[in-house]
Image: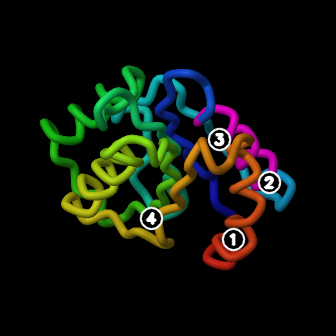
Amino acid sequence: MYTFEIIVGTTLGSAEYVADHLTEKLIDQGFQVNIHLDPQLKNLPINKNNPWIICTATHGAGDYPDNIAPLAQQLAQDRPDLSNVRYSIVALGSKSYDQFCNAGHMIDRQLAQLNGEKVAITLEICTLETPIPEDAIDIWYPEWAKNWL
């Protein structure tokens, strides 16, 4: 059985709420979950039994939230081989900005360059169109979960 590593990038809390909702769904299906609110590369298992779910908002002009930016820097500096990591991206943002969901797309490109295996299309959540961002998980989850069950 998998233990999911949910890596959260948040500024105002929306991504954390989405991660918490996703955690409930995973636990209800019998999975174990670790949530990383201060993600550090040294604390993330790099193996097939611990898939990563990056749940991140986009801050400012397309930037990472402050709490996940150090992880992106660690990945860029250390360049670990992530060929044993399966991952998914949940990106939050507002379509009123040019850089909609840019943080999610940046970390996605970074993980792909490090040989991570992406298992689903990125879920983009527009916080203007979805006032309760957690609701988007309910729609996305059944199809996504087929990768793991």
3D distance between C-alphas at marks 4 and 1: 13 Å
Q: Earlier in the sequence, mark 3 or mark 1?
A: 3
3D distance between C-alphas at marks 3 and 2: 10 Å
Q: Main secondary structure of the magenta part?
A: helix
Task: Write down the residue under mark 1.
Answer: 145
Q: In the image, what residue occupies the spot 28% across and 49% down?
A: 106
Kind of element beneath mark 3 = helix
Q: Residue furthest front?
A: 96
Task: Write down the residue under mark 4.
Answer: 86
Specify the segment rendered in magenta.
15-26
**Where does the image place residue 108, in percent across and percent down from the top left?**
33, 56
Three-letter residue code for mark 2: Lys
3D distance between C-alphas at marks 4 and 3: 17 Å
Three-letter residue code for mark 4: Arg
For residue 133: magenta? no
Quarter occupied by the C terminus: bottom right
Q: Is residue 135 left or right of residue 51?
A: right
**Where does the image place residue 57, in percent across and percent down from the top left?**
47, 37
3D distance between C-alphas at marks 3 and 1: 15 Å
